[in-house]
Amino acid sequence: MFYVVCFDIVDDRTRLRAAKVLKEYGQRVQKSVFECSRLTEEKFLKLKSRMEDLIDNSEDTVRYYSLCKGCLEKMELSGIGEPPDMEAYRVV
């Protein structure tokens, strides 16, 4: 499955750790936004668990958006950057 993961984390150290975790699962497309393709449900749950272990639930936020192939095909981009790699998309 394809996920867009974005976060708002107050603490600089925690923010760096979160980005490091997310880089293991996907590609950074903005400072606090990652696109994660090829995630099985098991990998997604592991990612989510790792992020929940890092953040402070009283002041931080992590959002996970799952996107279907049809949604990705409708994605539009302005400015610099590359659209998601449709070849990497895999329905699990």
Image (cartoon, rainbow, N blue to C red):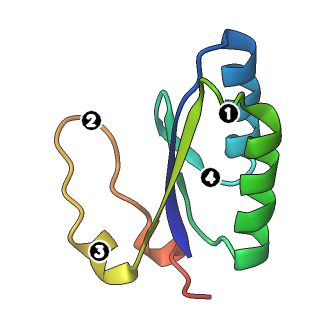
Q: Which residue carries the number 1 mark?
A: 57
Residue drawn at 38 percent across, 81 percent down = 69
- SS label for mark 3: helix
Snapshot quadrant of residue 25: bottom right
In the image, residue 69 above or below residue 61: below
- Residue at image location 70% in from the left, 66% down from the top: 44
Residue designated by label 3: 71
Q: Residue at x 59, y 16 (%)?
A: 10
Snapshot quadrant of residue 39:
bottom right
Locate residue 19, reporting x and y percent.
67, 32
- The residue at the far bottom in this view is 92
- Helix, strand or loop at disc 2? loop
Labels 2, 3: front one? 3
Q: Amino acid at mark 2?
A: Ile
Q: Which of marks 1 and 4 precedes in the sequence?
A: 4
Q: Nearer the viewer, mark 3 or mark 1?
A: 1
In this view, the mark in front (4 or 3):
3
- Please name the residue shown 50% across and 31% down the image: 32
Image spot of residue 11 (x, y percent): 67, 13
Image depth: mark 1 or mark 2 in front: 1
Disc 4 or 3, which lies upstream in sequence? 4
The 10 Å Cα crowd at callout 1, few under 14, some 14 to 19, many 20 or more, is few
Q: CA distance from mark 1 to mark 2?
A: 33 Å
Mark 4–mark 3 Cα distance, whole angstroms, equals 18 Å
Q: Which residue is mark 4?
A: 26
**Three-letter amino acid code at disc 4?**
Gly
The tag on residue 80 is 2
Residue type marked 1? Asn
Q: Quadrant of residue 1?
A: bottom right
Would you say 38 lies left or right of 53 here? left
* Mark closest to the chain's N terminus, 1 or 2: 1
